[in-house]
Image (cartoon, grey):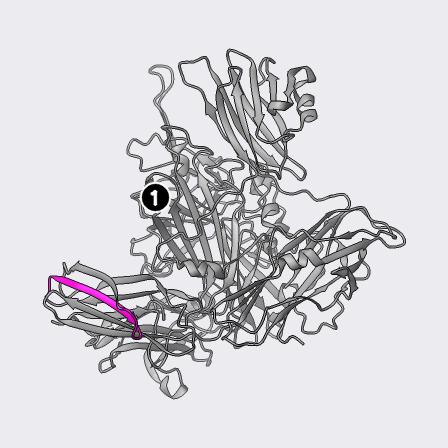
Amino acid sequence: MRIALIFASVWLLFSSCLTTTINAETTENAPMTSAGLETIIKNKDNTEVTISYVLENKKELILKTDQANMIDLSALKAELGADKVKEDADKKELILTLDKPETIDFKIMVDKKMPFLLSVLDADRNLLFDYQFNQAEKYDLILDDDDDPSEEATWTQTGKNRLSKGPILEHADGSSTQPYLYFGDYEEAVRSTATLESSWGPRGKSRQNSLTAPNSAILYAEPGSRIEDGPKSVTNHVYTSHYGDNQRMDNSVLPDDEDDTFGVPTSYTSNNIFNEIKHTDDWNGLRPGVSGPNKVGKSYAMIDTPKLYYRTDQKTGLEEQRLVYKQRAYWEDKKGRYNPEITTSIKLSFSKTGKVITSFTFKNTGKETFSNFNAFSNHDLSLNKDGNEITDPTGKKIGNFIPMRALGNERGMYFQSPNNEIRTSIYMNRQNMPHAWAARSASRSYLATKGFMYNPGILGLIAASSETYYPWKVGKSKGNSNFYDKKEKHYKFPYTPKDHRNAFYNQLDMGDKDQGKGANTRLGTNSESDPQWDAGVTMRTKPQDLAVGKTVKMEYGTMTDVPGTTFNPVVEFDNLGTDDEPQILPLDTENLTLSGNWYDFDSNHVTLYYGIDSDEEDNMHNVLFHQMQTDKEAEGGALHDFKNDIRIKGLEKGAHKIYIIAIDEDSNQSVLQEHAFKLIKPATKEPQIDVTSPSGTKKDPYAPTTDHFALNGFWSDKDSKKISTITYKIDDGEEVNYSKNLDNSKPGSLVPWRIEDLDVKKFNDFKIHTVKFKITDSDGNVGTTEFYFRHIGGGINLVAPEEIDFGQLSVSPTSQNQVKPNMQEGKVLLDDFREKGANQIGVSLSIGKFYKTDDSGTGGDDGDDGDDSGSSGDLDRDDNKESLLHNVYWDGQLVDNLNLLVGKTEDVKNQDWRETTDFTDEIVKKLKINFRAGENGAPVGKYVSRWTWNIVDSIQ
């Protein structure tokens, strides 16, 4: 674990800015007297606030705070003139005279740390508005009924951008690939000094990094190269699929610098909350206004810096990430004004096969129903390699204005470089699939548009005019050079051909969904010969009235392939069942149908084999299909559909799996995949009840990671009109009445049920426990089923701050000033999931040298890839860099830099499933560092040290 500490005598790096807007007005009948917080910009040492005003009568405003000395008086006098500012220190008030003609705003500098309330009053002491500064926004992390509250503790918040690595896939030619996932720009995710706050800083009208763009990349290691060497190896290459993602080396200089090739400026997540600020002129509301989240300073774009979390996915063992942020129409509530609020969560995770799954949850966290809510995921597509848009052998860029094609059978779309070097597929056929999607173009993340604007004109003077904006923008004629590049023979960003749309015509338009496009068919047009446009795709949810506390979900999957010199066949199945969400089938089912598509970039023959309930070699001899393709189809990686039946008659009731693998004529194998399904007894006269997820049998009991979890299943009854009761009990405990008097409106059908939060904390003895379910219908008939679980001793999780600040200091070769760390931004926590009685453990700390960071593109990266397997124990990595000398003190005693024991658990592991030990207070109390300059002094700047925290598994 790498921990960055910050030290500087004079800061040369400035923190990012946050801009906000608030408006407040008096009644319409009074002379116009209004004021508003126009912008709030958080600088390194203070917060810069712009207050706008209209004063038609008395030319005074009163600024009042509830804490003393919150406003920089000298700066305000310099802004307005000393004679225009009067102070009443006892009342904590400043009386401002604002009589300068044509001036409509002024700036104040306020404290950026102390929470305080600013109230702005008119000359008659009427409150115009007030605003609470330096108070953290509260976030609701339980965003859905399906969320398990106990699982929230498994997420760790971080203030730094993060890159998570997926499974390594080996290929027959000796090459290998590894997918990555992250938010925003790959460059920011790997830059060691990048933080969410700094990358979220303004870039003109936009942001440095579009964090709401869920993103992925793939690392390709050439044959003979080691993928473990990462992207720094000259024989390893990083491919990305969005414009401005790891593309800085293209050095595009555009009219608006916000669109330059870094920070993923034109991909983002959005919704129609802006329509409450500027209502569309569309009379039926089917084309609402939409804003990008990078509109600097607007509450409808984003209230503050997004919150980022990460954890290990227990299903795959791979890291996943989650970004959470909040949007509100207006900063403050006003009587009679509708002020909707949406909290958005975006989760990125890997499947076992390396597909990146993006899951959105949009929750109404406001106070009223959000009418006609619609959310969007916008992607500006571009195929890039090692910092540039991909090129052909002549150096011509070929990764952007390229056709997008259908995966077939409503699966989604793909786009592929003309030289067949890389293909990215986007799968829309997941459980919470987009309600509609369109492979068209994109938009800018800093725009806030009205949706549809209509100007009726003045008869005889001005003609009526109208215009639509993203995602409803109409196509343009290629005869107009403003929209069409005649030299390059393609449409300019973000325009599409006439009679097409930038994405959708309106909220009823499904785009490319449900259009029946066959595999490999071009999307967005019916003609292969039509000119290209800047490739992009927009997904959206179904428009709906979203009640308070309710959510909308949307999900898609992304897979990137690099064919290389030889290629393993790829098979994509439609709707594979998982352990947690198996396919449910009646016990008397004879055949199970598997469908999907396959492609192979170099072989003409592919055979798909399967086995039932075993992936042992002698069980994988069943052939699902044998198919062929031509040389031309292989060269382009053409998609081939299949739909075949597997006979499952005779399998017993319960959970089963089908294992599937494809092998081509060159003996190259696809990734082994599995389809989970469960056979349940069909409806009978006696009611039936089954637990379908998670899976927990007596032979293979469910192993929960926390002491609460959810259970899902189905019940059925062939003829009764009502179910009297559904009950459950754990072992021989008290019977719990789950539900009663349920209507059986469709006798014989499967009816879902769910227990949200089953509390099993007292069953922490590592024995198998049984949850016994009983269902009783109105005729007194009874059905039962059982679910088994067992707590298994888990591992140990160490959490430490991403960054620790030692503040600003002056140093000399003889400095004697022991400084303690500021750990307000994070804690050192040890979570112990082991079984009761496990040995006492502790945490040790090793402190590396403090090196001066530079201003290069690496942000001072010392070249360390995080692999300490070959370390000699010396953490000093580069003697040629400027550095500081330091001594470490613990509890007043001088100690070694390495392996300092900073704390230990109280005793052996207790009986709790999760025992948490917090070492933070002990470290702050006892750890101090004395910084010194070398004989020649130390240059001004920022110094960073690498701290390594280790778990000591035995205490002497």
Residue lying farthest bottom?
618
For the record, the magenta segment spans 720-734
Q: In the image, is 919 to the left or to the right of 310? A: right
Q: Quadrant of the N terminus?
A: bottom right
Of 906 and 370, the residue lying toward us: 906
Question: Which element type, helix, strand or loop, lies under badge 1?
Answer: loop
Along the line of sight, the residue nearer the viewer: 541 or 252? 541
Residue 170 image position (x, y, % from top left): 53, 74
Quadrant in the rendering for residue 864: bottom right
Q: Indicate left or right for 746 with 674 as reference.
A: left
Q: Which residue is mark 1?
A: 548
Percent x, y of residue 441? 44, 46
Q: Within 10 angstroms of label 1, few (less than 14), some, or many (20 or more) residues?
A: some
Does the magenta segment cover residue 607?
A: no
Q: Is residue 744 left or right of residue 22?
A: left
Query: Is 617 on the left-hand or right-hand side of 677?
Result: right
Residue type at tag 1: Val
- The mark total stands at 1
* Residue at image location 19% in from the left, 64% down from the top: 725
Q: Quadrant of residue 771?
A: bottom left
Give x and y (percent) for residue 449: 43, 34
User: Could you say where residue 331 lies in the image, as x and y percent from the top left?
Assistant: 47, 34
Quadrant location, the C terminus: bottom right
**Which one is in front, 426 or 732?**
732
Please indicate, yes or no, whether residue 710 appears anywhere in the rendered image. yes
| Above/below status of 581 relative to 111 | below
Identity of the residue furthest to the top in this view: 57
* Image position of 435 with respect to 916: above or below: above
Q: Residue at the location (29% across, 75% down)? A: 732
Can residue 234 be seen here? The reply is no
